[in-house]
Image (cartoon, grey):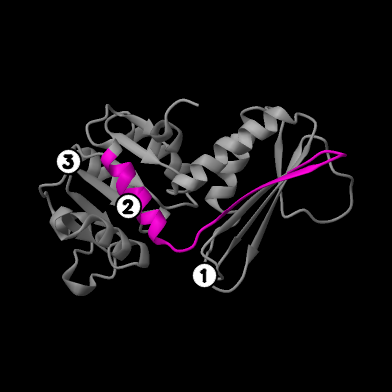
Amino acid sequence: MRAIVCGANGAMGRLIQAALGPDRVAGLVSLDGENGVARTFEELGPCAADVIIDFSHHSAAPAVLEYAVAQKLPVVIGTTGHTPEEKQAIQAAAAHISVFFSGNMSLGIAVLCRLARQAAAMFPEADIEIVETHHIRKVDAPSGTAKMLFEAVKEVRPQAWANCGRSGEGRRDKNEIGISALRMGNVVGIHEVHICTPSQTLTLRHEAANRAMFADGAVAAAEFLVGKAAGLYNMEHFLGKE
């Protein structure tokens, strides 16, 4: 498998290149154009690749997808914070090519989502709170991973709604799931799901030791995607049936 890396000069782009190894890097794109890297896909042009891995910025999604569809290449999207229009572009592209779209590329987070869903089903009356912590440079809140966790719980609690950054007066609604975002220091990423009944509290927690796990997950997702039929895929497809 040979991949085009979009966002190649960013921290994640460099980690992905390291995870791939030089023999599996087919092309590099980065808006800054530094280190001789193509600034745009037009500048890159067609190249012998099997997949695109995008870890640039959510606003780049339309350009990435346009190139991917034109070149008939599957694409792994590892960015978060997409607008409704960008999400529509992802859905539209998935009608023509295979697209792997996940708010987090960590296998551990995929397992956490599955466990959160199972716990929510086992404790249907429990209060559930999600807390995520990231470094001060992260711009979107709540994180894409926190949203994934909420959606996982919502699968077994259809009436659930997200209360992001609770403030003001008012009792907690039985169907609400609080989502809190902390931004401090250089924290790579910590996600906790608290499931609380009147008699006990279950806390599920995942902590990222370093960003290399996201690169490893993105490469594994790319390997999974190559050869797949057109459609939208995520970590649940990667993990397989429960």
- Give x and y (percent) for residue 208: 51, 59
Q: Residues within 10 Å of mark 1 (few under 14, many from 20)?
A: few
> Which residue is located at x 16 percent, y 71 percent?
36
The residue lying toward the viewer, choosing from 122 and 169, is 122
Tell whether 70 sits left or right of 61.
left
Q: Report the disc number at residue 230.
A: none
Which residue in the protein does label 1 denote?
A: 137
Magenta highlight range: 195-223
- Give x and y (percent) for residue 76: 33, 45
Which residue in the protein does label 3 denote?
A: 71
Three-letter amino acid code of the residue under disc 2: Asp
Label 2 to label 3: alpha-carbon separation = 15 Å
For the N terminus, give its image quadrant.
Answer: top left
- Give x and y (percent) for residue 200: 82, 41
The residue lying toward the viewer, choosing from 217 and 67, is 217
* Above or below 16: residue 82: above
Which residue in the protein does label 2 denote?
A: 54
Three-letter amino acid code of the residue under disc 1: Arg
> Which residue is located at x 21 percent, y 54 percent?
41
Three-letter amino acid code of the residue under disc 3: Gln
Can the viewer see residue 222 in this picture?
Answer: yes
- Give x and y (percent) for residue 80: 47, 52
Q: Quadrant of residue 98?
A: top left
Marked residue nearer the N-terminal end (1 or 3):
3
Query: Are the two marked residues, 1 and 2, in contact with CB atoms closer than 8 angstroms?
Result: no
> Which residue is located at x 13 percent, y 53 percent?
45
**SS class, disc 1:** loop
